[in-house]
Amino acid sequence: MAFNPKPKEAIMTPLRQKMIRIMDLQNLARETKRNYLESVEGLARHYKKSPDKITKEMIEDYLLFLKNDKGLAQGSLGVRATGLRFFYEKVIEKPMQINVRIDYKIKKLPIVLTQEEVWKLINAPDNIKHRLFLMTTYSAGLRASEVTRLKLRNIDSKRMLIKVTGKGGKERYSLLSKMLLKELRRYYKVVKPTTWLFPSNFKKKGLKPLSYTTAYNIYDQARKKAGIKGSSGLHALRHSFATHLLETGHDIRRIQVLMGHANLSTTLIYLHVSRSTLSRIPSPLDILEEQHADKGGQTDDPNH
């Protein structure tokens, strides 16, 4: 059963169709599906044969070729290896251990703005749409792809929730701030959006949502105007949302749900950037001192 590496130029093979169907059933994100398909296509092109005829050793040789000869970055190499594992485990049901070491770079902690910086940033734009766009992103902890594709019907003012479509088309609810709702009502009277909450101003006005480029430009212009230094991007507002909730004592599992994280481990990273949360944790040495002080113990003798 062949795997067509160039579906636009030839008939799609049953093997490729099966892979696409399985990825759709697992609700994988569009970018993930594209990366997985490219991983298998690259392997098929390299050996000029269908991937179901390729052995484990050939796969490892191919990954080493990408690593050593092509100089593929470690992150990209990891994506290729993950895509190939998916194909062999899920599509042709021949799980295999691919023994190629991938040295992932240490993941940097997310950039988080202070509450004062967020306040300055969301009030920096003169344009009401730009201001509400930033306010919505922060108040609900949204990704760029989520906030740009919000529709009017996603705002649930009765339950004070925002319905969000996240990665892989997964839906969830996030918070609708009282302040945001008040400002959105003012915004509606001025801008009068019809479908998209934040419509594009270009081409067919109002028929398309804001583009990613416009979204990031809105943030960058506001950041500079607010005098916030550094190279933080729009995603910093989402990171700040999670960190500020954590710092005010909210349960991390509830934050996980609001953020739309599939794994708690993804949300736990905010424990590392929450400085006020960390500063409230007592050192075990201080706890020991308090316990001994209560018992009347002495710690001044250097011979102990």
Image (cartoon, helix red, strand yellow):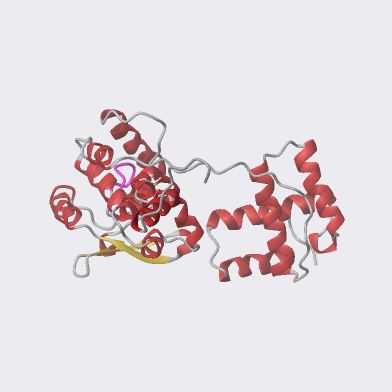
Q: Main secondary structure of the magenta part?
A: loop
**Res. 157 in view:** yes
Judge from the rendering whether residue 161 lies leftward or rightward of residue 231; answer left or right.
left
**Res. 198 in view:** no
Q: Is residue 259 magenta?
A: no
Q: Residue 152: x, y in percent?
A: 25, 60
Between 185 and 265, the residue placed more toward the observer is: 265
Q: Is residue 102 above or below residue 155?
A: above
Q: Residue 188: x, y in percent?
A: 17, 53
Judge from the rendering whether residue 251 lies leftward or rightward of residue 301; answer left or right.
left
Instruction: Give the residues in magenta.
Output: 199-205
Q: Residue at x 28, y 34 (%)?
A: 222
Q: Residue 4: x, y in percent?
A: 74, 58
Q: Is residue 200 magenta?
A: yes
Q: Is residue 287 above or below residue 223?
A: below
Determine the image quadrant of residue 112. top left
Q: Residue 84: x, y in percent?
A: 72, 58
Q: Residue at x 26, y 29 (%)?
A: 225
Between 37 and 290, the residue placed more toward the observer is: 290
Could you tell me which quadrant the N terminus lies in? bottom right
